Structures are given as C-alpha cells and as structure tokens.
Image (cartoon, grey):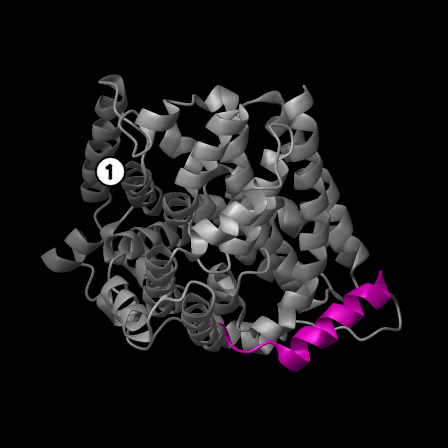
Amino acid sequence: MSKITAFFTELMRKYLPDPFVFAIMLTLLTMVLAFAVESRPVNLVVEDWGKGFWSLLGFTTQMAVILVMGYVLAAAPVVNRFLNKIANHVHTPRQAIIVATIVGCVGSYLNWGFGLVIGGIMARKLALKVKGVHYPLIIASAYTGFTMYSLGFSATIPVLISTKGHAFESSMGLIPLTQTIFSAPILITSLVVLIALPLLNAAMHPKQGEKVVELDPVVAAQDSKPAAGAGELLGDEKTLASRLNNSRVLSLLIGLCGMGYVGLHFYKGGNLDLNMINFFILFLGVLLLKTPLQYVEKVNEGVKTIGGIILQFPFYAGIMAIMHGSGLVESIAHVFVNISSADTLPLWGLVSSFVINFFAPSGGGHWVLQGPFMIDAAVKLGASQAQTAMSVMLGNGWNDLVQPFWILPALALSKLKLKDIMGYTVVSMLLVGAIYASTMLIWPHL
C-alpha cells in the first residue's frame, strides 16, 4: 500500500496543476475535441463557450449558498462540541484517519454541502489533537467521504426524477426514492463504502519511520484568528444596536418562521429541491448560532471557502455548453450505449458518467446533458430507468474523488495545495470504483 500511495502522490506532485489551471486546460481540450471529433467550426465553438459561460449563474449561487450554509452548520457551537467529544476519544493516527473519513461520509450522506465542510473541520481538529497524524492524508480522507452524497439524501439525480414535473417525466415518468437511494442494493453499497473506505484510508498512513507532515499548531492558531476589527462589532453591550446584534429573541423568531415555512411546504405536498434544502439549512443555522451577529461572523468565515467555486463554475458552464452544442456528450454516451445490453447498461452508464463528469462536475447539469441518451437507451434495451439513473449518479460521485473542482472547499479549509492530497484520493477512487461497478453489475440480476 505504501508503494502505491507513494507512486500516485509523487505523480500528482510533479504533474497536477492548480484547479483553476486545470479548468482552463479542460476548456481548451473541449474546444479542440469539439472541432476535431465533431467538426464543429471554431467560431461556433467559441460562441457556444461564450454564450454558455454565464448560463449557470443561478445554479452557481445555489452551490455557493449550500456550501456557506453547510459551513455555518458545521461550525455551530452544538456541532463543534459534538465533534470535540468525538475527538477526545481518538488517540492514534490511524484512528484519526478512520474517524475523519466516517464524519465526511455521514455528513455528505445527509447533505453534500454539510459533508464537504464538516469532514474538513473534523480532520483539522484531529490533526491538532493526535500526534503523528499525516495532515495531507487526513484532509484527503475527510474529502473522500464526499462520494457518499451520490448515495444519500441530497443525491441530485434521484431527488430530481422523483419530483413531479421534472424535465424528463414524459419519457421516464416519476421514479420514487424507494427504487433509487432507498433501494436495498444502494443501501448495501452505502454500508460497504462506509466500512471499506475508512479502512483503506487508514492503511495509507505512513508507517513508523516514514515521512509524516503534521499540522503546525502555530499556523493553525494564526488561521483561526478572527479578522481584524471583528471583535469591535460587539461594541458597547449597553447600546440598543449591540443588544439587537446579539439578540437571541430575533434569531429565535426568524428561525422559527423559517422552520414554520418548511413545515407548511411539505404539509401541502411540496417537493424537496435545492432551494428548499438551502432554505432549511439557512434557518437551522440561524437557530443554532443563536444571535444575528454570531451568524453573520460564521457566514463571513464560510465565504472564504467558496472563492474557487465562484471563479471556476462559469468555466465549467462554458465547457458544458461546448459539449452540448457540438454533440460531444452524445458521442461519448453512444460509445458506451452501443456496447451495452439491458444487464450491462448500468455498468457502462457508470463508466461514461465518470468520463463526462470531468467536463460537467455537477449532478444536475450532468444529468441534463447525459440523461436523455441514457433514458432512451434504457427504453430501447428494456433496462431499468431507476438503475440507469443511479448509474449516472454514482459515476458522478465516483469521479468527484479526482475532479479538482469539488476539492476546493477542502483546500480552502486546510491551506493545502491540490497536489498535496490528490494522490490519496486517486487510491480511494480505485476502491470506490470497484464497489460501484460491482453494484451496477449485480443489481440488474436481482
């Protein structure tokens, strides 16, 4: 295991660029492929890119909000105390790796934005507490839990296709969650990942005598310092302004209003979409942080983790526009569909989704591109629509382990570089791929 880990770590260190550079290179590669493979004229390729560049601003905002709100929840005092209690029972580096992975897995299963952040926070706590923990590995381990979102409550595609009025309802109907994320094969897959992934990550920890990079407590303390002037916002506690800023009553009232709306929404048969998820975690954060000022301060901290998302998502929107306009997605999907049968379509759907996710690292946007071809193939081959949709979802979650875009919040929290942790996530990707492929091979025969 040490040799495999060392190989991929050194490979990433030498050749992996910054995530933004990766996005630029991927944009240029997509342009070349559109021209060379699809014979799309260069001027039209550039037009596709420019027109699509800002096409996902609304979705970009949703992504940014869910990450910031996830940070606020993960940093709330009640959650922080809970994480501290867990950390107090961890005493060895391998235990720390296992716990960080499990926290990342469970958090991402519940909500992907929450999981992306809480895993990193847990990893930093453990890296400070447990002597001898290899810091890049524990951050990478916490991030690998992100793959569990594709199996959990916030898995975009299953939630979408279970919602009345979704874009492909006329061709595939409504697919209840009991046939996707709550089906027995997916629940078993979730359990297998939850057990196997932490053990693999722990096995990658450097042995005694090998080089270990620990988190410097001095650097961590400097990173944790509040921004200059932040304490001055409290002002004189006797003033009306200060009392309003620190009013628990105001937070309680507006928080209860938010929870009341959520309750009414579902009581009247409303759907669970991304806006409702954001609404819920926003006002849950307001309640947990207790005062308006504390909530604002945590939001300001969380905003630091999304700079890369805001910068890079428009580039991926442009890439997706090129792929759609040129027909590249259709060509990639057809390569795999043409060699599929009803029993193997989920497997090849998984593999093709893995490839496409490099260019479209968003569950919803990915499904808009690949979904029509997979739905049509499932109809022609007589394959299960639920299994086909989940194959695309799992391919998305599998690829996210090596897609630099979603690692950005982890890098922002840890102050590490992409090349520091990607070697470890590549190894985890190999294990997760084997698990997901096994599920897609076995499921059609059950």
In the displayed structure, would residue 214 be above or below residue 189?
Answer: below
Could you say where residue 351 lies in the image, as x and y percent from the top left? 60, 47
**Side of 51 relative to 111 (left or right):** left
Residue at 47% in and 26% down = 379
Q: Residue at x 64, y 25 (%)?
A: 444
Residue 293, image x and y in percent? 25, 56
Question: Closer to the camera, 403 or 252?
Answer: 403
Report the span colored magenta. Answer: 1-19
- Quarter occupied by the C terminus: top right
Report x, y in % for residue 72: 38, 52
Identified at 60% across, 76% down, the residue is 16
Decide: is 111 above or below 413: above
Q: Residue furthest bottom?
A: 14
Q: Looking at this rendering, what residue extends furthest in the left direction? A: 240
* Residue 211 in sight here: yes
Residue extending farthest to the right is: 209
Identify the image quadrant of the N terminus. Answer: bottom right
Which secondary structure dominates the residues rendered in magenta? helix
Circle 1 Cα neighbour tier, 10 Å, few/some/many (<14 / 14–19 / ≥20): many
Q: Judge whether residue 115 is colored magenta.
A: no
The residue that mark 1 highlights is: 255
Q: Front-most of 232 and 324?
A: 324
